[in-house]
Image: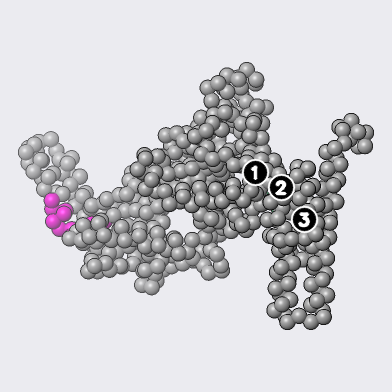
C-alpha cells in the first residue's frame, strides 16, 4: 500500500508538470482552449489521485520559531508506531532522566498508523528535501529550497475530515498527556552564537521548597496562596481580559533567599525556569525571539537586575547626559559588550514590552521574576505598581526565620540557647545564608533528627547512644558558634567606624 501512495504522489507530480507545460502553451493556442485545459488539469489530478498529504515542518520560515506540532508528532510516533519501523535512531539527550536512549524514527522511514478505520502513512523527510505531491497543506509553509525537516502524512482523501478534525487533535492530546506524565523540569539559559540568541536547557530539580525557606510565616503563606491562585486562574484572566501572567520583584540583601525562592516557586508550580542573561543579547529583536521561544507554564527570571543597571549607568551611550535623557523616556540602552557597541542594544522599554506590553499577551501561564539587591536603584518604570504584581522583600534573619532554619538543618525546635539567639538576632542584621552556614553540621550532611531516626531503626545500643550524644554535641556546637558569631557582629556594628579603621 505504501508503494501505491508513492505511485500516486509520483503521478500527481507528473500531472502537475503536465499542467505547467500547458500553462506555457504557444500563443496561437486559442485562449478558450487554454483556459479549459488549465482548469481541467487540477480536476484530473484530484480525480486520479485519491491521496492527500499534510506537511508538518520542524521550524517556520527563517527558523524563527520551533513548530510544536512537529514535537507532538515525534512524541506520538515514538509511542505508537515504532514497532513496525525497521530504521530507527537512538539519542542520549540531556533531557533523559536516566540512561535510557531516546528512540525515534529515522529519516525516510515510513510507518503506518490506523485511526477509526483510516490508514495514515507517516514519513520523516530530511532537511532540504523539496516538497512534492499534488495537494499539500502546510502548517508552516516555506518555499525556499532549504526546507527544514518535516513529517509528511498521507491519507485517502475520503478521510480528510477525520484526519483534520479528529486524528491530528488526538495526536496533540496524546503528546500533552505524555509530556505531563514524563515531565522533567528544565532550566534554560540563553547563549549567543553568530549574533543569534538561543536557549540551552538542563534538567532542573531545585532542592528548595517553601518549607525550607526561612521568612515571616504569614508572608510565606501569602506568597504560596498567590502562586496557587495564579495557577488556577485561567478563566479569571480570560474573563477580565488580562494576559495570564504575573510579575514578582524579589528584593533584599545578598544571601536572604531570593534565588532559593525561585527554586521553591518552580517546585510548587512544576514550571520550567528561563534564566535570562540580558548581557548576552544583541538587541530587542533577539530578546523578542528568545521570548517567543519560551514555553507556557514557565518562570522567566532576570537575576540581579540592579547589576545590569550599574552597567547601564557606566556604559550607557553618550554618558551621563544621554543617560538622563534616556531615563526620561524609559529608553535605557544597555550596551552589552564591546563587540556589539555600535549596533547592539536592549532597551528597558523592549524588556517591559514583554512584561506588560503588547508582547506579554503572547503565551500564557508565565511568571516573571526580577531579583535585586537594591530596589531603590531600579528605574521607576520597572518598579512602579502594577508592572510587577508583587514586591517581596527578603529580609535579614530574625527569630522566626531562625527557628525554621534550626528545624531544617538540625531538626530541633527548642534549645537552651534559643532565647539568647533570639535576642541577638533582633539586634544584629544577619542573613539567613550566614545563619544557615553556622547551622551546617560539619561532620555529617545529615541533621540530628535524621540521625536519631536512623539510630532508632538500628535498635539502639551503647555505640548508638554514643553517636547520638556526639551528634547532639555537634548541634550544641553549631548553636554556640552562631551565638559567638552574632556577638562578634554585634560588637562590630557597635564600634564607631573610626575605631574600625584603626583596628584594621
Ligand atoms: N530565607 C532563606 N531560607 C532558607 N535558606 C536560605 C534563605 N536565604 C538564604 N538561604 C541559604 O543561603 C544560600 C544563599 O541564598 P540565595 O542564593 O537564595 O540568596 P540570594 O538572596 O539569591 O543572594 P544574592 O542576592 O547574592 O543572589 C542558599 O543556598 C540557602 O541555603
Ligand atoms: Mg541570588
Q: Which residue is mark 1?
A: 394
Residue to which mark 3 is pinned: 418
Where residue 55 sits: x, y (%)? 32, 53
Residue 163 placement (x, y as % from top left): 25, 59
Write down the residue under mark 2.
397
Instruction: Decide whether residue 349 is among the magenta residues.
Output: no
Residue 184 rendering spot, x and y as whole percentages: 52, 60
Q: Is the residue at mark 2 in contact range of ligand 1, meaning its CB lies under 8 Å from it?
A: yes
Q: Which residues are magenta?
A: 43-53
- Quarter where residue 327 is shown: top right
Give whichever of 412, 55 is nearer the camera.
Answer: 412
In this view, the residue in front, 23 or 220, is 220
| Badge nearest the viewer, 3 or 1 | 3
Q: Which residue is at the front of the view, 503 or 301?
A: 503
- From the viewer's perspective, tell me whether residue 125 is left or right of residue 204: left
- Secondary structure under tag 3 reads helix
- Near mark 1 (Cα within 10 A), the count class, few <14, some 14-19 or many ≥20, is many
**3D distance between C-alphas at marks 3 and 1:** 22 Å
Label 3: few (<14), some (14–19) or many (≥20) C-alpha neighbours in 10 Å: some
Instruction: Relative to 40, say whether 96 is above or below.
Output: below
Whether residue 32 can be seen here: yes
Closer to the chain start, of discs 3 and 1, is 1
Residue 44 on the magenta span: yes
Distance from disc 2 to disc 1, alpha carbons, whole Å, reads 9 Å
On screen, residue 147 above or below 71: above
Look at the numbered disc 1 and say if its residue's Cβ is closer than 8 Å to ligand 1. yes
Amino acid at each position: 500500500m505504501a508503494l501505491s501512495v508513492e505511485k500516486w504522489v509520483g503521478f500527481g507530480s507528473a500531472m502537475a508538470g503536465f499542467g505547467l507545460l500547458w500553462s506555457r502553451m504557444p500563443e496561437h493556442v486559442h485562449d478558450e482552449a487554454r483556459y479549459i485545459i488549465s482548469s481541467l488539469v487540477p480536476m484530473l489530478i484530484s480525480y486520479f489521485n485519491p491521496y492527500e498529504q499534510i506537511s508538518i515542518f520542524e521550524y517556520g520560515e527563517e527558523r524563527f520559531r520551533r513548530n510544536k506540532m512537529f514535537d507532538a508528532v515525534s512524541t506520538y510516533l515514538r509511542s505508537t508506531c515504532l514497532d513496525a519501523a525497521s530504521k530507527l535512531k537512538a539519542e542520549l539527550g540531556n533531557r533523559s532522566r536516566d540512561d535510557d536512549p531516546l528512540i525515534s524514527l529515522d529519516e525516510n522511514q515510513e510507518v503506518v498508523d490506523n485511526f477509526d478505520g483510516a490508514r495514515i502513512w507517516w514519513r520523516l523527510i530530511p532537511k532540504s528535501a523539496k516538497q512534492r505531491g499534488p495537494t499539500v497543506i502546510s502548517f508552516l509553509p516555506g518555499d525556499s529550497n532549504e526546507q527544514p525537516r518535516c513529517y509528511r502524512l498521507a491519507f485517502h482523501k475520503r478521510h480528510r475530515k477525520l484526519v483534520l478534525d479528529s486524528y491530528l487533535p488526538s495526536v496533540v492530546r496524546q503528546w500533552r498527556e505524555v509530556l505531563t506524565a514524563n515531565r522533567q523540569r528544565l532550566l534554560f539559559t540563553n547563549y549567543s552564537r553568530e549574533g543569534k540568541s538561543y536557549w540551552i536547557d538542563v534538567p532542573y530539580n531545585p532542592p528548595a521548597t517553601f518549607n525550607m525557606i526561612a521568612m515571616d510565616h504569614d508572608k510565606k503563606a501569602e506568597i504560596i496562596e498567590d502562586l496557587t491562585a495564579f495557577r488556577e486562574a485561567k478563566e479569571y484572566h480570560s474573563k477580565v481580559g488580562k494576559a495570564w501572567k504575573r510579575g514578582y520583584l524579589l528584593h533584599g540583601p545578598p544571601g536572604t533567599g531570593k534565588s532559593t525562592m525561585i527554586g521553591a516557586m518552580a517546585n510548587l508550580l512544576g514550571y520550567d525556569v528561563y534564566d535570562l542573561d540580558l548581557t548576552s543579547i544583541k538587541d530587542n529583536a533577539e530578546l523578542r525571539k528568545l521570548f517567543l521561544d519560551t514555553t507556557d507554564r514557565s518562570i522567566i527570571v532576570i537575576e540581579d537586575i540592579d547589576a545590569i543597571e550599574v552597567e547601564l549607568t557606566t556604559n550607557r551611550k553618550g554618558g551621563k547626559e544621554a543617560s538622563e535623557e534616556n531615563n526620561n523616556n524609559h529608553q535605557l540602552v544597555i550596551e552589552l559588550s564591546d563587540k556589539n557597541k555600535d549596533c547592539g542594544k536592549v532597551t528597558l522599554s523592549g524588556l517591559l514590552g514583554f512584561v506588560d506590553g503588547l508582547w506579554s499577551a503572547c503565551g500564557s501561564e508565565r511568571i516573571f521574576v526580577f531579583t535585586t539587591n537594591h530596589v531603590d536603584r531600579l528605574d521607576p518604570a520597572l518598579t512602579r505598581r502594577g508592572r510587577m504584581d508583587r514586591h517581596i522583600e527578603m529580609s535579614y534573619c530574625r527569630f522566626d526565620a531562625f527557628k525554621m532554619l534550626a528545624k531544617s538543618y538540625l531538626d530541633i525546635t527548642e534549645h537552651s540557647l534559643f532565647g539568647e539567639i533570639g535576642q541577638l538576632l533582633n539586634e544584629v542584621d544577619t542573613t539567613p545564608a550566614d545563619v544557615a552556614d553556622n547551622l551546617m553540621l560539619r561532620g555529617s550532611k545529615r541533621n540530628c533528627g535524621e540521625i536519631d531516626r536512623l539510630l532508632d531503626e538500628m535498635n539502639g545500643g551503647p555505640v548508638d547512644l554514643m553517636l547520638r550524644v556526639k551528634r547532639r554535641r555537634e548541634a550544641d556546637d553549631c548553636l554556640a558558634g552562631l551565638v559567638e558569631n552574632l556577638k562578634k557582629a554585634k560588637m562590630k556594628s557597635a564600634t564607631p567606624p573610626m575605631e574600625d579603621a584603626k583596628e584594621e
